[in-house]
Image (spheres, rainbow, N blue to C red):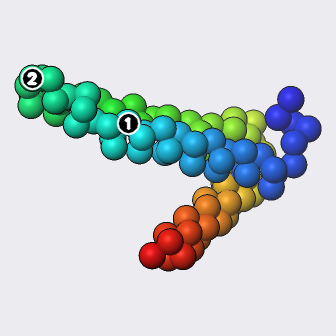
Amino acid sequence: MFNKLSKPFLGFLQASSLVNYIFVVSTFLNNVERIFNNGTSEFVAAITMLLLFIISAVISAVLVLGRASVLFWERKYSEAFTLIAWTIGWGIFYLTLFLALLYISQ
């Protein structure tokens, strides 16, 4: 299935998935005070945040580097690095878009 997709489109899908994941984590972090405000100890909250950080790093790595790793393993080095470049390019596009929206909203 992924072999039929072009590298720019696959990079777009990967970057979009990462942005959606970041949105979900940001929503959780915005509501964390309400979640942990019911007498939960600071120790449990700290463990939860560290686990979220570690799991988030793994999920982000899989979303960005997953398909490129498979291509690299199959010795398709050029395709792997091209896909990573497209994913980073789309990530920079999203960063620029969000910064522009932030600048416009102020």
> Can you say whether 28 is above or below 40 in the image?
below
The spot of residue 46 in percent (x, y) is 16, 33
Numbered tag placed on residue 6 in the rendering = none
**Three-letter code for the amino acid on which mark 1 is drawn:** Phe
Whether residue 55 is visible, yes or no, is yes
Q: Quadrant of the N terminus?
A: top right
Residue shown at 67% from the left, 60% from the top? 90
Q: Earlier in the sequence, mark 1 or mark 2?
A: 1
Label 1 – label 2 distance at C-alpha: 18 Å
Relative horizontal placement of residue 67, taking residue 102 as reference (left or right): right
Residue 36 figure quarter: top left
> Can you say whether 23 is above or below 42 in the image?
below
> Can you say whether 4 is above or below 96 in the image?
above
Q: Dot 2 lies on which element?
A: loop
Whether residue 65 is visible, yes or no, is no
Disc 2 residue crowd, few under 14, some 14–19, many 20+, Cα 10 Å: few
The spot of residue 98 in percent (x, y) is 55, 65
Q: Nearer the viewer, residue 40 or 9?
A: 40
Residue shown at 65% from the left, 47% from the top? 16
Q: Nearer the viewer, residue 16 or 2?
A: 16
Count of numbered marks: 2
Q: Which residue is mark 1?
A: 28
Residue 82 figure quarter: bottom right
Residue shown at 53% from the left, 40% from the top? 21
